Amino acid sequence: FYCLFGIPLMALTMATIARVLVERYIVDEELAAITRPLTPTECKFASKSLCSTDSAIHLSDYIVLQLMRQGKLSVDSFEFMKRQYQIMDQRRFWLKIADQDPI
């Protein structure tokens, strides 16, 4: 009886506890990365290489930089998304969506 129900139940319980602990750890790491002050190198990178074209760091630049600091976005992925956006922007994709009737 124990082998049939006890072992699977114990495994399920241990997996649930591990998932909760890992989720807490990930949240703590993300908060630590977000609250860590920007370095001069990061400021320079964000002000020249990300979303905006001026030397100021805008909200979009800051969000992209934070995603990169957390390892959730690579420079290559960002550049690809930026190119895709520029292609859609040239085709006036955003205006076509805004002109559509709401569902």
Image (cartoon, rainbow, N blue to C red):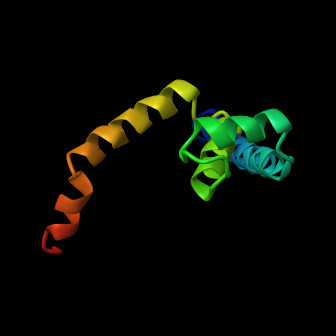
**What residue occupies the far bottom of the structure in this picture?**
102
Q: Quadrant of residue 65?
A: top right
Residue at position x 43%, y 37% from top? 82
Closer to us: 58 or 62: 58
- The reply to whether residue 5 is in sight is yes
Q: Say whether residue 55 is left or right of residue 40.
A: left
**What residue occupies the far top of the structure in this picture?**
76
Q: Quadrant of the C terminus?
A: bottom left
Q: Position of residue 69 (x, y in %)?
A: 71, 37
Residue at position x 60%, y 48% from top? 54
**What residue occupies the far left of the structure in this picture?**
101
Residue at position x 13%, y 73% from top? 101
Q: Position of residue 48 (x, y in %)?
A: 63, 38
Q: Say whether residue 31 is left or right of residue 96.
A: right
Q: Quadrant of residue 9?
A: top right
Q: Position of residue 47 (x, y in %)?
A: 67, 43
Q: Position of residue 98 (x, y in %)?
A: 22, 67
Closer to us: 36 or 90: 90
Closer to us: 11 or 97: 97
Residue 2, above or below 23: above
Q: Quadrant of the N terminus?
A: top right
- The reply to whether residue 11 is in sight is no
Please give the count of numbered marks on the rendered protein. Answer: 0
Closer to us: 34 or 46: 46
Q: Say whether residue 51 is left or right of residue 44.
A: left
**What residue occupies the far front of the structure in this picture?**
54
